[in-house]
Amino acid sequence: MKNYIKKPVTILSALILAGCSMSYKIIRDEPVKNIPDKSYETIIRLNTPDSEPLEPEAGYVYVEPGGKVKTDFAREEVVQHIDMLNKYKLFNKNNMGKFIIKDSKGKVRGYYEILPEYRTIIWENGDDILLQIIIPYNMMNSIGNGRDNSGKSGGHHGGR
């Protein structure tokens, strides 16, 4: 009886995965030395899960005019320009990995820079590009609940 249920579920799962993979194409990211200093249609700031004052942004996405690049990041904010960063944030920005976003035809759609602990996958679906950002495992349990300090060195301060 279990095989009668197991086989159809396995086949259905395989068909769903095949259908999803055919509608999206994974694009290889290419590192660049610098992000061009020019005007962009949109600049997206990717805030870290905790958004603490001394916590750096996870990264930035620079969308070319007509680039149609979106992200799946939960805490993103569209900004006009990033010239107003303080020294701490500027230091972190300078240490981010920098990449170009090209579609499968080689057209430049934008650029992104991201902290080294984050991973990305670039998906192309027709004329749209999705930049999927994978949050580091050590941050996943702290989203929305403040930072989980279990397992870290140091103690609580303030007379507790």
Image (cartoon, rainbow, N blue to C red):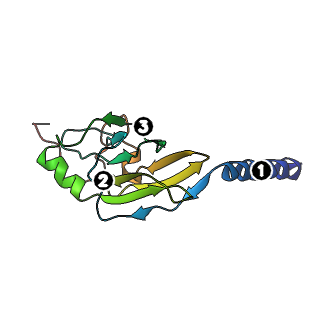
Give the residue at mark 2. Answer: 151
Q: Can you say which quadrant of the picture contains the C terminus? A: top left
Question: In the structure shown, which secondary structural element does the residue marked by tag 1 occupy?
Answer: helix
Q: Residue furthest left?
A: 159
Task: Give 110 or 47, whichever is nearer the viewer.
Answer: 110
Secondary structure of the residue carrying numbered label 2: loop
Cα gap from disc 3 to disc 1, whole angstroms:
29 Å
Whether 76 is drawn above or below 2: the answer is above
Q: Amino acid at mark 2?
A: Gly
Alpha carbons under labels 3 and 2: distance apart: 26 Å
Q: Residue at x 32, y 48 (%)?
A: 58
Give the residue type that dot 1 points to: Leu
* Residue matched to label 1: 15
Per the image, the residue denoted by label 3 is 74
Asked whether the viewer can see residue 66, the reply is: yes
35 left or right of 11 in image = left
Residue at left 30%, top 65%? Answer: 33
Residue 67 in percent (x, y) is at: 46, 45
Residue 143's mark?
Answer: none
User: Quick one: label 3 or label 1, which is nearer the N terminus?
Assistant: 1
Q: Secondary structure at mark 3?
A: loop
Type of amino acid at the residue the image marks with label 3: Ala
